[in-house]
Image (spheres, helix red, strand yellow):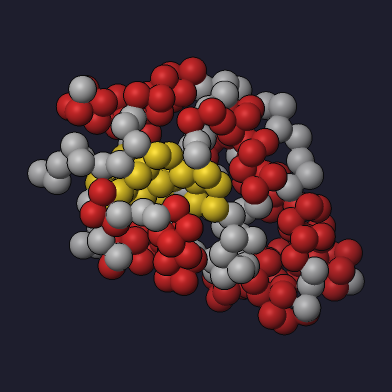
């Protein structure tokens, strides 16, 4: 069994990781992406959905595909797609409690925007736990799982890979972290894309419930 007693850097993906995928917050963002594509490329809704999914799978993010194929302004895209209603997100006091108890630094590593991350963790009531947010702008718009943003993240926060763990709902996004010597934890879900490679050698832990997992860690490191 892999020990987590020496962990000093706790790295978390944001969407569908720090909150449950059942909240469907990302479906709201998906709809905004489609609307952006409809407005910018002057296509109908079915075609916009096709483009959104195609670019996501081929380029890591829909934004990356739009930038490469259509020279879309990234800042305008991010501002538009994250202009959603966050009111249904509730405070997670238990998660906040367990995050506070973790020793070391807590960092968010997301393909989304910093503004979206800040709004989300504020609504969840966990904002004060995080010392940094590394977003898609910090990544020079190069998304996970390209290894480049992982290296930038490590450099920016002076992360010791052997003393770190990365939590993420998309299994293949854990592979670069594993290659760099970071321990990995997959947030279990039934999405076909997210599950791809979940049973690979690069996944150290499978997490059904993040709060419970952190609670168990805190009991062991206390």
Could you tell me residue 15's position as x and y percent?
54, 45
Q: Can the viewer see residue 198 in this picture?
A: no
| 221 to 182, vertically: above or below | above
Query: How many discs mark residues in the rendered view?
Result: 0
Q: Can the viewer see residue 88 in this picture?
A: yes
Instruction: Give the side of residue 71 with respect to residue 222, left or right.
Output: right
Residue 28 image-quadrant placement: top right
The quadrant of the image that shows the N terminus is: top left
Residue at 68% of width from left, 66% of height from top? 63
| 105 to 218, vertically: above or below | below
Could you tell me residue 198's position as x and y percent?
31, 57
| Residue located farthest toward the left when viewing the structure as drawn | 1
Residue at 77% of width from left, 61% of height from top? 75
Seen from the viewer's position, the closer of residues 113 and 198 is 113
Could you tell me residue 35's position as x and y percent?
82, 57
| 53 to 99, vertically: above or below | below
Instruction: Give the side of residue 87 with respect to residue 128, left or right.
Output: right
Instruction: Give the side of residue 102 with respect to residue 217, left or right.
Output: right
| Residue located farthest toward the bottom when viewing the structure as drawn | 69
The quadrant of the image that shows the C terminus is: top left
Could you tell me residue 87's position as x and y percent?
72, 27
Residue at 52% of width from left, 44% of height from top? 132
Residue 89 image-quadrant placement: top right
Residue at 48% of width from left, 30% of height from top? 129
| 216 to 38, vertically: above or below | above
């Amino acid at each position: 069994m892999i020990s987590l007693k020496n962990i000093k850097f706790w790295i978390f993906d944001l969407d569908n990781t720090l909150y449950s995928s059942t909240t469907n917050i990302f479906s709201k963002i998906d709809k905004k992406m489609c609307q952006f594509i409809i407005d910018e490329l002057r296509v109908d809704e079915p075609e916009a959905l096709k483009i959104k999914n195609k670019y996501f799978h081929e380029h890591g993010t829909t934004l990356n595909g739009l930038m490469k194929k259509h020279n879309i302004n990234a800042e305008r895209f991010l501002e538009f797609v994250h202009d959603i209603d966050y009111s249904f997100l509730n405070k997670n006091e238990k998660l906040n409690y367990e995050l506070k108890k973790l020793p070391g630094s807590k960092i968010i590593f997301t393909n989304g925007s910093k503004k979206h991350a800040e709004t989300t963790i504020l609504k969840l009531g966990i904002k004060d736990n995080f010392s940094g947010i590394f977003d898609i702008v910090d990544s020079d718009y190069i998304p996970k799982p390209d290894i480049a943003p992982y290296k930038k993240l490590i450099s920016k926060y002076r992360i010791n890979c052997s003393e770190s763990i990365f939590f993420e709902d998309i299994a293949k996004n854990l592979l670069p972290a594993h290659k760099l010597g970071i321990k990995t934890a997959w947030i279990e879900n039934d999405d076909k894309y997210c599950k791809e490679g979940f049973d690979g050698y690069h996944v150290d832990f499978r997490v059904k419930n993040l709060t419970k997992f952190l609670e168990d860690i805190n009991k062991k490191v206390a």
